[in-house]
């Protein structure tokens, strides 16, 4: 069976939809609750590299913590390393779900993207 690692929050509706979709496509999932423990900085750095996306795409810009910390104004002047360490310091800052098979990474959930990228 094909395995994927998913960084998610169990109470998040988007995450639940993504999990349902991946399971329906025959994937076995190793789940990590980002609210309980954010992935360490080195893992986040690897995920960003594999995704080919900018670091800022990994931020949950609609989340409370993002807004409380005023990150919209702070992120542009931060280095990528500082952003990665910030993501590792608080899982609530991470846009979810993040899904990977060790080669490919997706951030967030769009059903049509998942059908293309994670077709069983």
Image: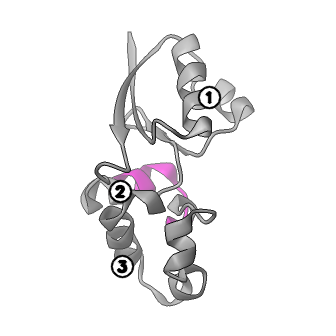
The circle drawn on residue 82 is 3
Whether pointer 1 and pointer 2 mark residues with C-beta atoms closer than 8 Å, the reply is no
Secondary element at tag 3: helix
Q: Which quarter of the figure has residue 4? A: top left
How is the structure coloured here?
Answer: one colour
Toward the right, the furthest residue is: 112
Viewer-nearest residue: 65 or 103: 65
Q: Tell me, yes or no, whether the highlighted magenta stretch contains residue 41.
A: no
Could you say whether the residue bearing mark 2 is in a helix, strand or loop? helix
Instruction: Answer with left or right where residue 93 lies relative to residue 36.
Output: right
Query: Marks 1 and 2, how far apart in space?
Result: 23 Å
Residue 91 occupies which quadrant of the picture? bottom left
Whether residue 2 sits left or right of residue 57 in the image: it is left
Q: What span is in magenta?
A: 46-56
- Say which quadrant the N terminus sits in: top left
Look at the numbered disc 1 and give the secondary structure of its residue.
helix
Q: Nearer the viewer, mark 1 or mark 2?
A: 1
Q: Find out whether residue 51 is within the magenta segment.
A: yes
Residue highlighted by disc 1: 17
Dot 2 corresponds to which residue? 44
The structure residue drawn at horizontal position 43% and vertical position 49%, both measured from the top left corner, is 50
Residue drawn 44% across the image and 58% down it: 92
User: Visible in this render: residue 64?
Assistant: yes
Question: Is any part of residue 25 visible from this angle?
Answer: no
Task: Return the x and y of residue 12 as percentages of the image width and height.
Answer: 55, 40
> Crowding at label 1, few (<14), some or many (≥20) Cα neighbours within 10 Å?
some
Label located before the other in sequence (2 or 3): 2
Q: Quadrant of the C terminus?
A: top right
In the image, residue 73 sits, relative to residue 46, either above or below, namely below
The tag earlier along the polypeptide, 1 or 2, is 1
């Amino acid at each position: 069976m094909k395995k994927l690692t998913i960084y998610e929050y169990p109470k998040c509706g988007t995450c639940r939809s993504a999990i349902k979709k991946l399971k329906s496509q025959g994937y076995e999932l190793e789940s990590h609750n980002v609210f309980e423990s954010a992935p360490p900085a080195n893992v986040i750095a690897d995920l960003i590299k594999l995704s080919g996306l900018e670091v800022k795409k990994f931020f949950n810009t609609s989340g409370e913590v993002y807004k409380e910390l005023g990150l919209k104004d702070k992120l542009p002047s931060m280095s990528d390393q500082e952003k990665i360490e910030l993501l590792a310091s608080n899982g609530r800052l991470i846009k979810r779900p993040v899904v990977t098979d060790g080669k490919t990474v997706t951030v967030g959930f769009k059903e049509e993207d998942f059908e293309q990228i994670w077709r069983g």
